[in-house]
Amino acid sequence: MNTAGLGLGQSKQNQQLSRSQLQVHLLQLALTSAISLLLMLKDFTSAYSAFIGGLLYIIPAAWFSLRVLAKGQLRSPKQILANVYTSEVGKVLLAIALFSLTFAWVSPLNGFALFTTYILLQLSGWYLQLKMNNRFQKL
């Protein structure tokens, strides 16, 4: 059984990275929930559209993180880079599929709430990565 993605058998640095990624995704889920609850005061369609927009960002991002961090046994830089590239391609394809399914199956949908939440989570991901990794603050 491969336990590398669960923090077992990983280096200390990889475990810290796994924890920080989990924290980022949980904070983004909390932000998505808060936005949805606030939009519930406006109308239900905006609220669930915002929640779906958040999930459209979180699901592929979490899949990418899990896939990249679970491959802790890769040793050569070539293997690591190939894993990152294939994971990124998979993330983009997953996002395209989820957007397609959303637009095909969810009606009515507030596109503004969906895309605003998606973009806000993209920005929050960048911000949280910089804040949680102190070495970037020294540059």
Image (tube, helix red, strand yellow):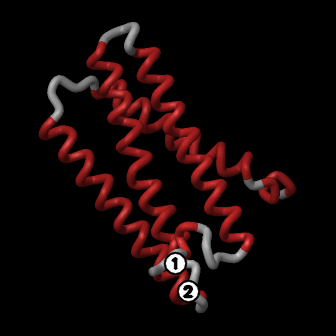
On the image, the x and y values in percent for residue 56 come to 35, 44
C-beta proximity under 8 Å, tags 2 and 1: yes
Residue under label 2, please give it: 74
Q: Is residue 38 left or right of residue 46?
A: right
On the image, the x and y values in percent for residue 99 come to 26, 45
Quadrant housing residue 72? bottom right
Amino acid type at circle 2 is Leu
Q: Residue at x 66, y 62 (%)?
A: 17
Q: In the picture, which quadrant includes the N terminus?
A: bottom left
Q: Could you classify mark 1 by the number of other residues whose Cα lies within 10 Å: few (under 14), some (14-19), or many (20 or more)?
A: some
Vertical side of 82 occupied by 21: above or below: above
Pick whichever, 80 or 22, lies toward us.
22
Q: Is residue 20 left or right of residue 1?
A: right
Residue under label 1, please give it: 71
Q: In the picture, which quadrant includes the C terminus?
A: bottom right
Q: Residue at x 42, y 66 (%)?
A: 88
Vertical side of 40 occupied by 23: above or below: below
Give the CA separation, mark 2 to mark 1: 6 Å
Vertical side of 10 occupied by 37: above or below: above
Pick whichever, 33 or 4, lies toward us.
4
What is the number of the mark on residue 27? Answer: none
Pick whichever, 52 or 99, lies toward us.
52
Label 2: element kind = loop
